[in-house]
Image (spheres, helix red, strand yellow):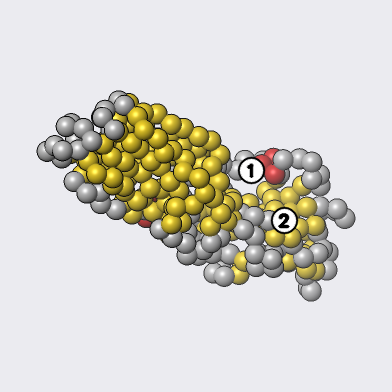
Amino acid sequence: MIKRLTRNFRILFYAFLGIQGLAVSAQTIGFTDGYEIEGWDASEIAGGTTEITGVSILNAEFTYTVRLAGGGVTSRTADYTVTVPNSGTITFDWAYTGNHRFFQAFEEFHVIVNGEEVATPLAESSSSGNFNYSGFDQAVSVEAGDTFGFRIGGRNFDSNSELDGLLSISNFRVVETATPGGLGLIISKNEVAPDTFDFQWSSRNGRVYDLLSSTDLSVPVENWTVWEGQLDILSDGEMTQIQAIASGGPRRFFVVVEKPAP
């Protein structure tokens, strides 16, 4: 049976038969596994409104609108943030568009961690009329418990004292930092049936697991087969174990794949 991995699956770790598993970085694809859009916060922007919209699991939009009576718009920004569930590297594509009107208009876009702007601004420029900036594969390292997010906004000195901005984030993904020994798959001989093996790995509530296997590491993991019917294994909490699994030969590789529970 071939089990194809969809984008929201997480490959946790793999092991050679008979030795302790090696930890491999888990990957989250899209606004899921702690990055759900409903878990993000949007700050207020003086004289206007902010909004976060989940377009799809891979795409989200962060917007602001400012409407003042006149005299220009002094510099102001809005922050859109989420608490990081696990240490790792966040990567995304982006497009920042809008209109801060005309005279002395200015716009800016920063990535922020714990309220501080990190690295080089992704956009910081004067404009007149519509603006449009974009980028690909922006990567930011974060630690569990950090507040990660985006800061966008700007100013003008225009009698038309209005700001409109839209930040579109796409291809959002997170590669978590592997914890040495913390996610390791352990394979050991079964004491009752010595020709079979027991598998044990760290797990989480609300998740299910597939045990995939191959005899050839050159085969992409998404083409590995479910081994011995071990599909949608329910989590036992912090540690999950399955027992008396046939080896199928002297050389075999295994992957445990974590998925959201159905």
Q: Residue 140 in the image: state x and y as whole percent.
A: 54, 50
Q: Is residue 181 left or right of residue 32?
A: right
Q: Is residue 128 above or below residue 156?
A: above
Horizontal relation, residue 260 to residue 11: left or right: left
Q: Left or right: where does residue 72 sit relative to residue 34?
A: left
The residue lying furthest to the right in this view is 250
The residue located at (31%, 48%) in the rendering is: 78
Picture layout, residue 245 above or below residue 36: below
Q: Residue at x 76, y 40 (%)?
A: 219
Between residues 68 and 8, which one lies in front from this camera angle? 68
* Residue 241 vertical position relative to residue 168 in the rendered view, above or below: below
The image position of residue 85, as x and y in percent, is 49, 61
Q: Which one is nearer the viewer's eye here, 31 or 168?
A: 168
Residue 131 position by quadrant: top left
132, 92: nearer the viewer: 132
Residue at the image position 31 percent from the left and 51 percent from the top: 42
Alpha carbon distance from label 1 to label 2: 16 Å
**From this viewpoint, which residue is outermost toward the top?**
129
Element at badge 2? Answer: strand
Q: Which residue is mark 2?
A: 14
Whether residue 33 can be seen here: yes
* Image quadrant where residue 12 sits: bottom right
One can see residue 227 in this view: no
Mark 1 or mark 2: name the one nearer the start of the chain. Answer: 1
Which image quadrant: the N terminus? top right
The image position of residue 171, as x and y in percent, is: 50, 39
Category of crowding for the residue at label 2, using alpha-carbon neighbours closer than 10 angstroms: few (below 14), some (14–19), many (at least 20) = many
Kind of residue at badge 1: Lys
Point out which mark residue 3 bears.
1
Frontmost of labels 1 and 2 is: 2
